Amino acid sequence: FPRDFEGMIKAIAKYRPTMFFAVPTMYASINSYPGVEQYDLTSIRLCVSGGAPLPDNVRDTFERLTGCKMREALGMTEATTGCSCSPCVGMRKEGVGIPFPDELMATIDADGNFLPPGEPGELVIKGPNVMKGYWNNPEATRNAFVGDGTWVRTGDVVQMDEDGYFKVVDRLKDMIITSGYNVYSLEVENVIYMNDKVLEAAVIGIPDPIKGEVIKAFIAPKEGETITAEEIIALCKEKLAPYKVPRVVQFLKELPKSSVGKILKTQLRAM
């Protein structure tokens, strides 16, 4: 994950690239870099975000800095990385667009039944890009496919609208169940990102003897900013149902990330 954001910003301003591909945390870091407004980033005509859901305010800020319209893409190794993207014509502001040519995408419930448009469910993908299976692991291969054995599971919770456009709701493993209610972490994180002093945010479920799980938020403030737990909780109370409000808020200088910049919730759960 690149650390020299000043060098990156200067390179964009100097060499005038027209395309830019990154993960959400990289866009957030560019947005919050001190003095970024002094650099001309308007050469970028196409920028694509992938690897994790894109927070609304991160997209809006980068679009303001560059003048381009951001597109979200979805992919996975088991489907040869690329699966869908917002099209150039008929682009929607939110969501990961429509499947690439020759690919099919659908949603299923917990029992593997296909769902109609509008209902959130696990995304499954079918097409010539999908793997045949995991090397020397027949059990994992069986568990990865549903339906007629050609639809691969992604672990992503999505919604498909009537026009066939997809929107990521959460990762199945990141969904929190509190007092019997399903809480999608992305919804809570999007609200936390409404605070302009937040650089990075992630929420997880932590054990609770009464509710099963309660929500804990991890937040990295922007450089030089100070945030209190009280203001984060107050914001969430204003925007969310009571059961979706974090009960615990922990501040870190930086959230743990993979080599490509994905926030590692597995490490947050171990804290």
Image (spheres, helix red, strand yellow):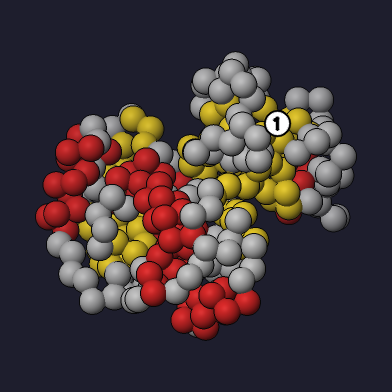
Locate the C terminus and report the quarter of the image it occupies: bottom left
- Location of residue 178 (image quadrant): top left
Residue 97 visible, this angle: no
Determine whether 2 is above or below 75 in the image.
Answer: below
Coordinates of residue 119 in the picture (x, y in percent):
52, 21
Locate the N terminus and report the quarter of the image it occupies: bottom right
Coordinates of residue 145 in the picture (x, y in percent):
75, 36
Q: Residues within 10 Å of mark 1 (few under 14, many from 20)?
A: many
- In the image, taking residue 53 as reference, residue 250 lies left or right, namely left
- In the image, taking residue 152 as reference, residue 20 lies left or right, namely left
Given residues 223 and 121, the one toward you in this image is: 223
Given residues 142 and 155, the one toward you in this image is: 155
Coordinates of residue 203 in the picture (x, y in percent):
35, 52
- In the image, taking residue 190 as reference, residue 173 lies left or right, namely right
Given residues 175 and 257, the one toward you in this image is: 257
Amino acid found under the numbered disc labelled 1: Met
- Location of residue 185 (image quadrant): top left
Residue in view at x 64 percent, y 68 percent: 17
Coordinates of residue 33 in the picture (x, y in percent):
38, 73
- In the image, taking residue 152 as reference, residue 48 lies left or right, namely left
Residue in view at x 40 percent, y 47 percent: 56
Residue in view at x 29 percent, y 75 percent: 223
Determine whether 153 is above or below 39 in the image.
Answer: above
Q: Which residue is mark 1?
A: 105
Number of labels in the image equals 1
Residue in view at x 30 percent, y 70 percent: 222
Residue 241 visible, this angle: yes
Q: Element at badge 1?
A: strand
